[in-house]
Image (tube, rainbow, N blue to C red):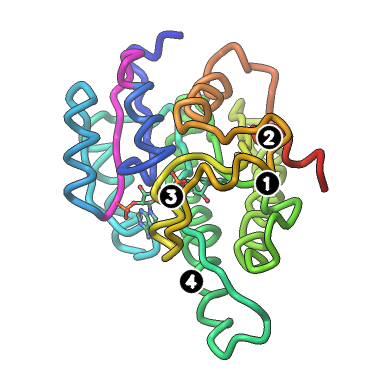
């Protein structure tokens, strides 16, 4: 699948699914833009890509979001594909004293920032008749764990946003799709203060295993490619069958 001369912007490209995605698109000839906050991780991913544009930015900060789009346009003059991947997990219960802060942090990162970056990128994506891939989660549809309630709400919002964007942008020839991974090896648990090994989740999956970030990257690339030219507003689940059990 060639992405030669295409500009692919990956938020959260410094780690996990985003890192695998940036590396894959780079291997297929794209000019990749990698966005994240952690400089060490960004540098690590950059080494595995061909001449990427690295933007250290926090997607929740309004000025940073604007800078992400401005620097991309300055460097390449266009955006073909936006992968809205930056996201966080936080745990909590409605009985927690600080649950509102947890809720706000999740919604700011997983929903508001995604919406804002999309808002800024859309005029450029209309120009190229490009497309957008949003990274949601099966937690937006089922509760693998009740402490993921607020996270699940943020991802359910992403699901519905994808449908709305798909509908609004279809007339401009712009496609918008969703991917909902199940458990996928990345830094997301450790970043949420959870040091459980990923393998501990495997027995709860009908296929008896969890996903690799590279599998999600493959699906992102498929949806971003012309092979998916008739697909918009849909949600692709990659979860080793976990949704079948709920
Ligand atoms: N792994 C799973 O099991 C799983 C399952 C379903 C859905 N997902 C979704 O997949 C996406 C990627 O997660 P992952 O599993 O690859 O986790 P990860 O390894 O923790 O990566 C998350 C990425 O998001 C970036 N990020 C988070 N907050 C940011 C902010 N405010 N500004 C800029 N970048 C930010 C991180 O960058 P820095 O660390 O550099 O700031 C990092 O690159 C998320 O949307 C997540 O909800 C993951």
Q: Which residue is mark 2?
A: 237
Seen from this angle, which residue lies furthest top? 1
Q: Residue 238, image x and y in percent?
A: 64, 32
State the SS at label 1. Answer: helix
Q: In the image, what residue occupies the spot 28% across and 37% down? A: 73
SS under mark 4:
helix
Tag 2 or tag 1, which sits nearer the N-term?
1
Left/right of residue 193 with respect to residue 103 in the rendered view: left
Alpha-carbon span between mark 2 and mark 4 = 25 Å
Camera-side mark, 4 or 1? 1
Q: Quadrant of residue 21?
A: top left
Q: Nearer the viewer, mark 3 or mark 2?
A: 2
Question: First in sequence: mark 4 or mark 3?
Answer: 3
- Residue 234 image position (x, y, % from top left): 71, 33
Q: Position of residue 13 (x, y in %)?
A: 34, 40
**Real-space CA distance between mark 3 and mark 1, rounded to the nearest whole angstrom:** 16 Å
Residue lying at 53% horizontally and 54% vertically, measured from the top left: 115
Q: Are marks 1 and 2 in contact (CB under 8 Å)?
A: yes
Q: Secondary structure at mark 2?
A: strand
Label 3 belongs to which residue?
86
Q: Is residue 79 left or right of residue 230?
A: left
Nearest to N terminus: mark 4 or mark 1: 4
Provide the residue span drawn in magenta.
26-37
Tell me: is circle 3 under 8 Å from ligand 1: yes
Q: Is residue 22 above or below residue 190?
A: above
């Amino acid at each position: 699948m060639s992405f030669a001369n295409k500009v692919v912007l990956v938020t959260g490209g410094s780690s996990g699914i985003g890192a695998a995605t940036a590396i894959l698109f780079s291997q297929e000839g794209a000019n990749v833009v990698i966005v994240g906050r952690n400089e060490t991780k960004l540098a690590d991913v950059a080494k595995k890509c061909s001449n990427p544009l690295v933007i250290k930015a926090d997607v929740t900060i309004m000025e940073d979001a604007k800078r992400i789009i401005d620097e991309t346009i300055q460097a390449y003059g266009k955006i073909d594909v936006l992968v809205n991947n930056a996201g966080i997990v936080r745990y909590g219960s409605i009985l927690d004293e600080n649950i509102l802060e947890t809720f706000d942090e999740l919604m700011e990162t997983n929903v508001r920032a995604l919406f804002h970056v999309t808002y800024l990128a859309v005029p450029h994506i209309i120009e190229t008749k490009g497309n957008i891939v949003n990274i949601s989660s099966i937690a937006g549809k089922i509760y693998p764990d009740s402490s993921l309630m607020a996270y699940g709400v943020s991802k359910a919002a992403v699901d519905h946003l994808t449908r709305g964007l798909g509908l609004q942008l279809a007339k401009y020839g712009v496609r918008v799709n969703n991917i909902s991974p199940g458990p996928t090896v990345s830094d997301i648990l450790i970043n949420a203060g959870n040091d459980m090994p990923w393998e501990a989740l495997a027995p709860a999956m009908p296929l008896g295993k969890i996903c690799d970030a590279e599998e999600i990257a493959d699906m992102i690339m498929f949806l971003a490619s012309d092979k998916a030219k008739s697909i918009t507003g849909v949600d692709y689940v990659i979860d080793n069958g976990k949704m079948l059990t709920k």
